[in-house]
Image: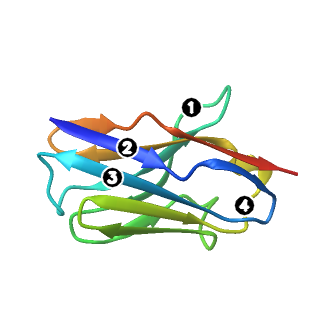
Amino acid sequence: QVQLVESGGGMVQAGGSLRLSCAASGSIFSINPMGWHRQAPGKQRELVATITRGGSITYADSVKGRFTLSRDKNTVYLQMNSLKPEDTAVYYCYVITGREYWGQGTQVTVSS
């Protein structure tokens, strides 16, 4: 079984920064892909950033240059700089170990 716990969400003014953390426990390994999705009200979940088993990182075009994903063993981080109101969403951490596992999500709210 796999458990993921996100933290670091909150409220911030436009232009500010937040750092999200996701700690995974259970039967996972450092080669398992991990990353972040987000979902805003009325919208579908979208990929924010992901890191593959080879260590390559993919970002959504909307966050390139502003967000940075990093990983330390089974903890993944999302450093979010220059936040915009359109970044407001619930951010979900995930890991793939034959199937998808998701955290409960953490709310990020960016005010104008």
Which structural element holds mark 4? loop
Query: Toward the viewer: 51 or 109?
Result: 109
Q: Residue at x 63, y 30 (%)?
A: 43
Residue at 67% over, 25% down: 42
Q: Dot 4: within a 10 Å radius of its alpha carbon, few (fewer than 14), some, or many (20 or more) residues?
A: many
Name which residue type carries label 1: Gln
Q: Earlier in the sequence, mark 2 or mark 4?
A: 2
Say if mark 2 contacts mark 3, CB within 8 Å. Answer: yes
Q: Amino acid at mark 3?
A: Ala
Q: Which residue is mark 4?
A: 83
Q: CA distance from mark 1 to mark 2?
A: 22 Å
N-term-proximal mark, 3 vs 4: 3
Judge whether 29 appears above or below 15 on screen: above
The alpha-carbon separation of the residues under discs 2 and 4 comes to 22 Å
Look at label 4 and name its amino acid: Leu
Residue 30's spot in the image, x, y percent? 18, 63
Which marked residue is nearer to the observer: mark 1 or mark 4? 4
Which amino acid type corresponds to the residue marked 2 in the rendered image? Val
- Residue shown at 43%/64% (left/top)? 58
The circle drawn on residue 5 is 2
Of labels 3 and 4, the one closer to you: 3
Total labels drawn: 4
The residue where tag 1 is placed is: 44
Camera-side residue of 26 and 57: 26
What residue does disc 3 label? 23
Q: Residue furthest left?
A: 27
Q: How far is mark 3 from mark 4, CA to CA?
A: 23 Å
Does residue 17 appear left or right of residue 5 in this picture?
A: right
Between discs 1 and 2, the one toward the N terminus: 2
Residue 2: % across, % down: 20, 39
The image quarter containing residue 56 is: bottom left
Residue 20 vs 10, above or below: the answer is: below
